[in-house]
Amino acid sequence: MEQANVHTSELFTLQLPSNPDSITLLETLIEEIADKYHIAEDTFANMMTCLNEAAINAIIHGNKLDISKKVIINAEVDAKRIIWTVTDEGPGFDYSNLPDPTAPENLENLTGRGVFIIKHLADQYIYNAAGNEIELHFKI
């Protein structure tokens, strides 16, 4: 009897306290997954950058550094891609109406580049309707 193609994936989950120092836990998870799945260096760098931006945004802007709130991070890995999900407990934001960080009036701002960076480095990104969850896709 012929066996059907079975689509298998592995799921990783991490809960971060809303403290910027907790980012080191996320970085460790990214490194572990990259090692286990032999992720190319450029993809690894893009994942590290995007996930740092998404998690810091969730901690600072989403959860407002409220230590009673968590940031939930999931990674679903299969043979062809990794899908990361970063969810905060905040009210969300209007991700479709952000100022352009490359506009002359915004070039010297210290913040406001995270979503712009994510848009350019992830293979695909999807926000939920509320704007408190982002899904990041990376081909491996």
Image: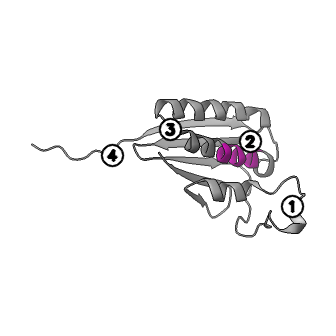
Tag 3–tag 4 contact (CB < 8 Å): no
Tag 3–tag 1 contact (CB < 8 Å): no
Image quarter hosting the N terminus: top left
Residue 7: give its label: 4
Residue 68: give its label: none
- Residue at numbered disc 3: 39
Disc 2: CA contacts within 10 A as few (<14), some (14-19) or many (>=20): some
Label 1 element class: loop
User: Up-down: is 59 above or below 99?
Assistant: above
Q: Work out how far the residue at label 2 is from the one at label 1, CA to CA, in angstroms.
A: 32 Å
The residue sitting at the left extreme is 1
Q: Residue at x 17, y 43 (%)?
A: 3
User: Up-down: is 135 above or below 77?
Assistant: below
Q: What secondary structure is the stretch in magenta mostly built from? A: helix
In primary-sequence order, the first of circles 4 and 1 is: 4
What kind of residue is marked 1?
Leu
Q: Quadrant of residue 130?
A: bottom right
The magenta segment is 49-59
Residue 106 magenta-drawn?
A: no
Q: Work out how far the residue at label 2 is from the one at label 4, CA to CA, in angstroms.
A: 34 Å
